[in-house]
Amino acid sequence: MALPEFQKTGVTTVTFDRGRVFPISEPIEVYQHRYDTEGLNTKVISYNVQNDFINAPFTGLSAANKTALETFFQHVNVNWSESDFTFVDENSQSRTVRLWQDRFNMVENSPNRFSVSFLLKDES
């Protein structure tokens, strides 16, 4: 299996030191309003919007990987959630994604080894 990557034209590609931590989760968010009428009939209003997400947790990343990730998201061509970028997963599947979180928190689990979890909105 290949190592995951974040890619964006004009920005240095980040190749992760390790693959995502299992279990891998890719939830689908569906926008529907559900309710019961007085007669206990169920009604559903669908807004025809669906968002696909990718949870991307990583652990055991090096200090160099930490710095590369910080540089990637701070780059003017990405600017955290402002611009989309390409996520290439362990199966070499490329998807256009956007960072979908407000907090970037790299936790040092052991000397010079970090963990982080990204919520990515799939915009492919």
Image (tube, rainbow, N blue to C red):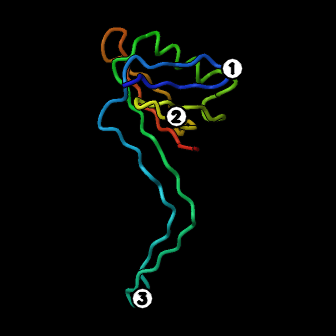
Name the residue: 37% across, 86% down: 40
Q: For the residue labelled by badge 1, is the local secondary structure a helix, a strand or a loop?
A: loop
Number of residues whose C-alpha sits closer than 10 Å to that of mark 1, classed few (under 14), some (14–19) or many (20 or more): few
Query: How far, Cα to Cα, is label 3 from label 2?
Result: 48 Å
Name the residue: 38% across, 26% down: 58
Residue 8: name its quadrant: top right
The residue to which callout 3 is attached is 38
Q: Quadrant of the C terminus?
A: top right
Q: Is residue 2 above or below residue 98?
A: above
Query: How far, Cα to Cα, is label 1 from label 3?
Result: 58 Å
Q: For the residue labelled by badge 3, is the local secondary structure a helix, a strand or a loop?
A: loop
Inspect the image, locate mark 3, and give the three-letter code of the amino acid beneath it: Glu
Name the residue: 56% across, 19% down: 13
Inspect the image, locate mark 1, and give the three-letter code of the amino acid beneath it: Gly
Give the total of numbered labels.
3
Question: Looking at the image, is mark 1 or mark 3 earlier in the sequence?
Answer: 1
Number of residues whose C-alpha sits closer than 10 Å to that of mark 3, classed few (under 14), some (14–19) or many (20 or more): few
Q: Is residue 105 left or right of residue 96?
A: left
Q: Is residue 96 left or right of residue 63?
A: right
Question: Looking at the image, is mark 3 or mark 2 earlier in the sequence?
Answer: 3
The residue to which callout 2 is attached is 94
